[in-house]
Image (cartoon, rainbow, N blue to C red):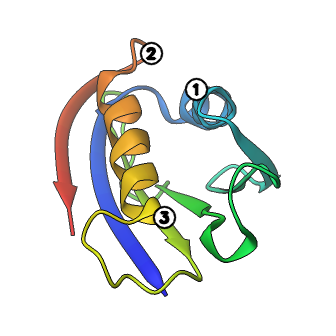
């Protein structure tokens, strides 16, 4: 299973982050399947890639440390594909989504840490 993670500190009010992140995921051609105020799960749309390569994205918003000035968030991008090559489909989607979050005009990126 391929799995990539990244943590962000964003300058955005907590109550605005969730709807903005749902919109960003949809703009990245992901189908948001479930969300709460601090968790979002989205999947790649069926038909674009084989089932084993379909990416699932989980976004976790850290409400416990959020302030009016900044909010911490983590994403996990994973699929059932074996990560036999460094440049696999899951990694490509991870890099695409990470860049979309970092470049979003809806917030100011304070810090990004990929793991």
Q: Residue 36 sits in which quadrant? A: bottom right
Q: Are marks 2 and 1 in contact (CB under 8 Å)?
A: yes
Determine the CA span between mark 1 and mark 3: 22 Å
Element carrying mark 1: helix
Nearer the observer, 40 or 69: 40
Between circles 2 and 1, the one closer to the viewer is 2
The disc label shown at residue 106, or none = 2
Q: Which residue is mark 3?
A: 77
Determine the CA span between mark 3 and mark 2: 21 Å
> Percent x, y for residue 55?
60, 63
Q: Residue at x 71, y 66 (%)?
A: 50
N-terminal of the two: label 1 or label 3? 1
Q: Which residue is mark 1?
A: 16
N-terminal of the two: label 3 or label 2? 3
Q: Residue at x 78, y 45 (%)?
A: 31
Horizontally, residue 10 falls left or right of residue 52, namely left
Between circles 1 and 3, the one closer to the viewer is 3
């Amino acid at each position: 299973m391929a799995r990539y993670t990244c943590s962000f500190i964003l300058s955005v009010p907590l109550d605005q982050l969730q709807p903005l992140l749902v919109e960003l995921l949809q703009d990245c051609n992901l189908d948001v399947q479930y969300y709460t105020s601090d968790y979002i799960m989205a999947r790649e749309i069926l038909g674009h890639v084989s089932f084993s390569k379909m990416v699932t994205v989980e976004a976790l918003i850290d409400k416990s440390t959020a302030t009016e000035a900044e909010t911490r968030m983590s994403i996990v991008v994973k699929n059932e594909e074996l990560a036999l090559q460094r440049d696999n489909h899951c990694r490509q989607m991870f890099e695409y989504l990470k860049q979309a979050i970092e470049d979003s005009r809806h917030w100011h990126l304070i810090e990004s840490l990929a793991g």
